[in-house]
Image (cartoon, rainbow, N blue to C red):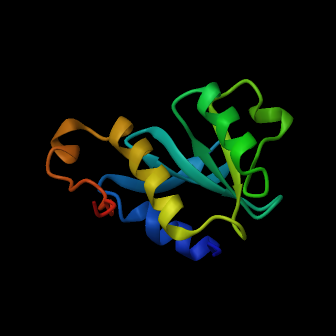
Amino acid sequence: MSVTKAQLKKVALSFPGTVEAPSYGKPAYLVGKKFFTRWRDEEASIVLIVDSIDERDMLLEADPKTFFITDHYKNYPSVLAYASKIDAKTLRGMLDRRWRKLAPKKLTAGAAAPSVKRPRR
């Protein structure tokens, strides 16, 4: 249950249309010209954009060992995840949601939805 910098790169670049490019002088991943995610060396963490500040706050409350923010992110729908605490499946799911919001429709139309295990009845 840990994601390395190399794994983040592999997962991020697996989404069609994603490129590695600087964002505010830091290495990041973009979809088109829009910020997708990036690695933060400061805490060995990953920057994740979510749908709202309410969603971010819910993540912070539900799993404070994995998710946190710094003062820089307090007014944005962003959350930071400790790379040592987030698993690849959760990371991929969060990035998939973000990618579907950023990617052109021609890319998302052909993309398969993430597989979800449904409980047996």
Question: Which quadrant of the structure image shows residue 118?
Answer: bottom left
Q: Residue at x 20, y 37 (%)?
A: 105
The image shows residue 92 at horizontal and vertical percentages of 45, 60
Q: Is residue 68 above or below residue 55?
A: below
Is residue 116 placed above or below 103 in the rendered structure? below
Expressed as whole percent of the image width and height from the top left, the position of residue 23 reads 60, 44
Quarter of the picture holding the N terminus: bottom right
Q: How many marks?
A: 0
Q: Residue at x 61, y 54 (%)?
A: 38
| Residue occupying the point 63% across, 26% down | 54
The picture places residue 62, in percent across and down from the top left corner, at: 70, 45
Q: Quadrant of the C terminus?
A: bottom left
Would residue 58 be found to the left or right of residue 114 on screen? right
Is 76 placed left or right of 103 in the picture?
right
- Outermost residue on the front side: it is 121
At horizontal 15% and vertical 44% (from top left) the residue drawn is: 109
